[in-house]
Structures are given as structure tokens and as C-alpha cells.
């Protein structure tokens, strides 16, 4: 029905955009057909590897001196950015919004997709906790209260939503004071949680660690079950995504918030907010409701499609959303790249320049006064559009492959094909909707 609507010409989109939408949906449908006929047995294996990293390199990476040096450098940078946030001007020339929204939120998943779960290694709050435990001479895993297993990843889901709410729903997301308040609350909550629950709190309660660990399932650099550093196929890491309460919620927040970011740029949504809200607080309430609605739609639609699978018991059906949640990770990362790549490349440069002169006093520590931001991507919109389409389509195709492989492992033989149809329809809808939001506005 979606394809028929696009072909019928009832949309107001320009013809090239319509072709992008229809082509994207057809590309995903064809890829599903190819996977069905060519991928007849489970292939994804976390134990498989392309190569093992040389032992000398592994020893250098795993050496306590290397780990602590990296931690201290990151902590020092965080302290420097925090000082700049408070000592610098309270306007757009402050480096904090760029560090927060660009280097951290966009840079973290890119680094994680290449190198693995980097945040658990460089996290400043983990470092502070580790140093404190060393001073007190107690293991970092020591907990005053055992972390409740029923909570799972839900605390980190709440933290992820709090971040995207500040970015997408708050009245002034670029407010230095608002970002300082958010970061202060984050540090306090992480350290108090670690005091109570030990390292388990970071794994389940730190939104940035959950973000990094989720995208890191795609990293070609990984650890083997024996602990060795290996190079592997990005898809082989997806089945290792932990099945916890809140796992689907975490991916839904990442995917739904990116969709809302695009949807909120549509003139129809902006006009609706302006006409209905009547005040700044009303606009925040509407944007909050819209953000929550899109995140919920992603999560509920995925859950319902998993529940539509036949041939399994009620208990097995309840476990399906968690068992298939990893198939949404490539889709979420594809959207992040498609939506934020230009922003990361260009705004990232200006953020670095602001960091080299945090007070706006004309510092020239690196001889950067003659540097200029290169708008290399904005100057080539055709290239950017092609990259966006490629990121979205590749993410969905990898998601289809991951879902198909998991279905081969989980579903009875008689339902392996029909059991995937509902999820396939959903992914076609996600593809069509994602491309529409990227290009239709």
C-alpha cells in the first residue's frame, strides 16, 4: 500500500524525492528476497574472526599504563571543557554545546562503531569512581545494594530520553546554563549510583555507556570469548547484544528520537506547534509529546511485529522482542550517520576552534587564529544526499540480514519465512518513513 501510494502520485513531493522513497522501499524488499533464498542457515557467529591482533599490540592496548593514560587524558579534557563551560561566555561562542551535542553525542557512536565500547574505557565518571575506590581500597564492583535485575537497562533508557528531550524538546537546547545543569545532574547520578550499586550501575544506568555499547556491536574490532583482540565482520557482533529489560527501549529511543529530529523540521509540524501551543511552555509540552509518541511508536510497532510470529509458545513469543532487538542497531546507526554527518564534520570543526579559545580572549595556543571551518559537505549537496540514502539503505539491509539470521535460529522451520513477514513490512515502512523525513522536508 505504501508503494502504491507513492506511485499513484498523490504525494506533493518532488519527483526525484519520490523516486528516492520508492527506490529505497524496493531495494529493501529485493534484499529481503535475496536473503530468504541465499541465506538458508544461521551464519552470524560472535566466535568467528577475520584475524587476531598481534600480541605485541594487544599487550600495549591492555597494559594498565595505557588504560590509565587514556582515562586521565579524557578526564583532563572533561575538566577543561567543564572549566570552559563555566568560565566562558554564556552565548553561542561557548564551546559546551558543541562538545555536548557534536563531539559526544555524534562522535561517540562513530568511535564505538569502529573501535568497540569506548565509553566504558574512557568514561570520566568511571575514572572518578575507580580513583575513589583505590583511595578507599575497595574493588570497583563493591555494592552497598545489589542492582535489581528487573530494572535491566531502563535507567539508561530514561537517561537517553532525558538527553534527546533536552536536544529536541526543550525551549532552548543551546542554553549553556541548561546543558551545565544536565551534565551536573548526570555526574551526580552516576557517582551516587556507582556508590550504591558498583560497576553494575554504569552498565545499566549510564546513558552514554549504553549508547556506546549498543552501537559497538557493529565494531570490526572486538574481543573474542577468550579475551583476545580480533577483527571480525560487523554483523557477527550483533547477536551479542544483551537481552535485558529495556533493551528494546534503548534502541527505540535512538531510532525514534532521530526520526523526531527530522520530523520536527517539517513545516507542517512547526506550524502546528506555533498555532496550538500559545506559549513557550506549551511548545515544550507539544514537542515532548511528539518525541515520546515517535519513540513509543517505534518500540510498540517492533514489539507487535515480533508478537505476530507464529509457531512459538507464549513464553517464547514474549522473549522475541529482546532476541530480535539487535536487528534495529544497524538501522539506528544508519539514521545517525545520515542525519548528523554534515553536522558532525562542520560543527565539529567550529567546536574545536572554540575549545582552543574558550574565553574568547584571542588565545592562539595552536596557531589556530588563521584556521577556518571547511564546509566541504555543504558545498556538495548531491554527494551528501547520496551518502544519506546509502546510510539509510545499508542500515536497513543489515537489519534485515540480522533479523533473518536470528529468525533462523529461533523460529521453527515451518515458520521461518512467514514469521519474518511482519518485521519485514515494518522495516520497509521504517525505510520509507526515514527517507521521507530526510528528504521530504
Image (spheres, helix red, strand yellow):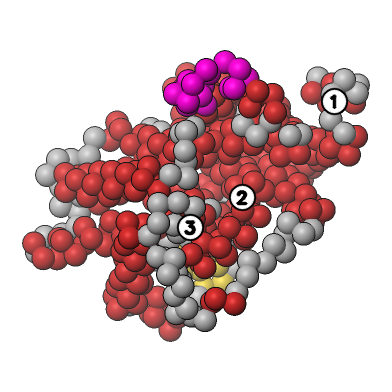
Q: Find the distance from the CA under tag 2 to the CA under tag 3.
A: 21 Å
**Mark-to-mark CA distance, 1 and 2:** 26 Å
Q: Which residues are magenta?
A: 272-287
Which numbered circle lies on residue 93? 3
Residue 292 in the image: above or below residue 90: above
Q: Secondary structure at mark 3?
A: loop
Q: Quadrant of the C terminus?
A: top right
Q: Residues within 10 Å of mark 3 (few under 14, many from 20)?
A: many
Q: Are marks 2 and 3 in contact (CB under 8 Å)?
A: no
Q: CA distance from mark 3 to mark 1?
A: 40 Å
Quick check: 411 left or right of 9? left
Say left or right for 147 vs 155.
left
Of the two numbered discs 3 and 1 on the same chain, state the one appearing first in sequence: 1
Q: Judge by depth and name the residue closer to the eye, 408 or 127.
A: 127
Binning the other alpha carbons within 10 Å of mark 2 as few (below 14), some (14 to 19) or many (20 upward) gives some
The quadrant in which residue 298 appears is: top right
**Which residue occupies the foreground of this view, 270 or 335?**
270
Chain-order first, disc 2 or disc 3? 3
**Between disc 1 and disc 2, whose residue precedes?**
1
Label 2: which residue?
340
Q: Residue at x 84, y 24 (%)?
A: 11
Q: x and y percent of residue 377 in the render?
A: 72, 59
| Residue 402 place in picture, x, y as percent | 62, 43
Q: Secondary structure at mark 2?
A: helix
Q: Local crowd at mark 1 within 10 Å, few (<14), some, or many (≥20)?
A: few
Residue at 29% x, 78% y: name it. Answer: 65
Q: Can residue 172 be seen by looking at this rendering?
A: yes
Residue that lies at the very extreme toward the left in this rendered image:
136
Q: Where does the image place residue 207, in percent across and percent down from the top left?
A: 39, 45
Up/down of 432 relative to 379, above or below: above
Mark 1 secondary-structure assignment: loop
Return the residue nearer the eye: 360 or 303: 360
Amino acid at each position: 500500500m505504501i508503494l502504491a501510494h507513492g506511485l499513484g502520485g498523490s504525494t506533493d513531493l518532488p519527483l526525484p524525492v519520490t523516486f528516492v522513497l520508492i527506490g529505497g522501499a524496493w531495494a529493501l524488499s529485493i534484499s529481503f528476497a535475496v536473503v530468504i533464498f541465499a541465506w538458508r542457515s544461521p551464519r552470524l557467529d560472535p566466535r568467528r574472526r577475520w584475524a587476531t591482533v598481534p600480541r605485541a599490540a594487544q599487550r600495549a592496548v591492555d597494559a594498565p599504563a595505557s588504560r590509565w593514560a587514556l582515562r586521565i587524558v579524557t578526564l583532563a579534557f572533561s575538566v577543561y571543557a567543564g572549566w570552559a563551560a563555566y568560565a566562558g561566555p554564556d552565548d553561542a561562542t561557548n564551546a559546551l554545546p558543541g562538545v555536548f551535542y557534536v563531539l559526544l553525542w555524534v562522535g561517540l557512536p562513530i568511535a564505538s562503531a569502529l573501535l568497540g565500547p569506548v565509553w566504558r574505557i574512557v568514561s570520566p565518571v568511571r575514572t572518578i569512581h575507580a580513583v575513589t575506590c583505590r583511595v578507599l581500597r575497595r574493588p570497583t564492583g563493591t555494592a552497598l545494594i545489589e542492582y535489581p535485575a528487573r530494572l535491566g537497562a531502563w535507567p539508561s533508557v530514561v537517561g537517553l530520553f532525558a538527553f534527546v528531550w533536552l536536544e529536541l524538546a526543550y525551549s532552548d537546547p543551546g542554553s549553556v546554563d541548561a546543558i551545565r545543569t544536565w551534565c551536573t545532574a548526570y555526574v551526580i547520578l552516576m557517582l551516587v549510583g556507582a556508590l550504591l550499586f558498583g560497576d553494575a550501575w554504569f552498565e545499566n544506568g549510564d546513558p552514554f555507556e549504553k549508547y556506546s555499547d549498543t552501537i559497538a556491536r557493529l565494531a570490526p574490532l572486538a574481543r573474542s570469548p577468550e579475551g583476545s583482540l580480533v577483527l571480525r565482520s560487523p554483523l557477527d557482533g550483533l547477536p551479542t547484544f544483551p537481552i535485558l529489560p529495556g533493551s528494546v527501549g534503548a534502541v527505540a529511543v535512538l531510532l525514534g528520537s532521530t526520526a523526531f529530529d527530522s520530523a520536527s523540521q517539517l513545516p507542517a509540524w512547526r506550524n502546528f506547534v506555533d498555532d496550538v501551543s500559545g506559549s513557550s511552555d506549551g511548545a515544550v509540552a507539544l514537542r515532548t509529546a511528539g518525541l515520546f509518541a515517535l519513540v513509543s511508536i517505534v518500540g510498540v510497532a517492533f514489539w507487535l511485529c515480533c508478537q505476530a510470529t507464529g509457531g512459538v509458545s507464549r513464553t517464547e513469543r514474549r522473549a522475541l522482542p529482546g532476541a530480535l532487538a539487535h536487528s534495529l542497531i544497524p538501522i539506528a546507526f544508519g539514521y545517525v550517520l545520515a542525519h548528523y554527518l554534515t553536522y558532525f564534520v562542520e560543527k565539529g570543526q567550529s567546536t574545536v576552534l572554540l575549545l582552543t579559545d574558550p574565553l574568547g580572549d584571542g588565545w592562539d595556543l595552536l596557531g589556530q587564529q588563521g584556521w577556518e571551518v571547511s564546509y566541504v559537505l555543504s558545498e556538495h549537496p548531491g554527494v551528501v544526499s547520496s551518502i544519506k540514502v546509502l546510510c539509510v539503505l545499508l542500515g536497513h539491509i543489515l537489519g534485515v540480514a540480522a533479523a533473518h539470521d536470528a529468525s533462523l535460529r529461533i523460529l521453527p522451520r515451518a515458520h521461518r519465512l512467514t514469521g519474518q513477514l511482519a518485521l519485514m513490512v515494518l522495516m520497509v515502512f521504517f525505510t520509507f518513513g526515514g527517507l521521507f523525513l530526510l528528504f521530504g522536508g
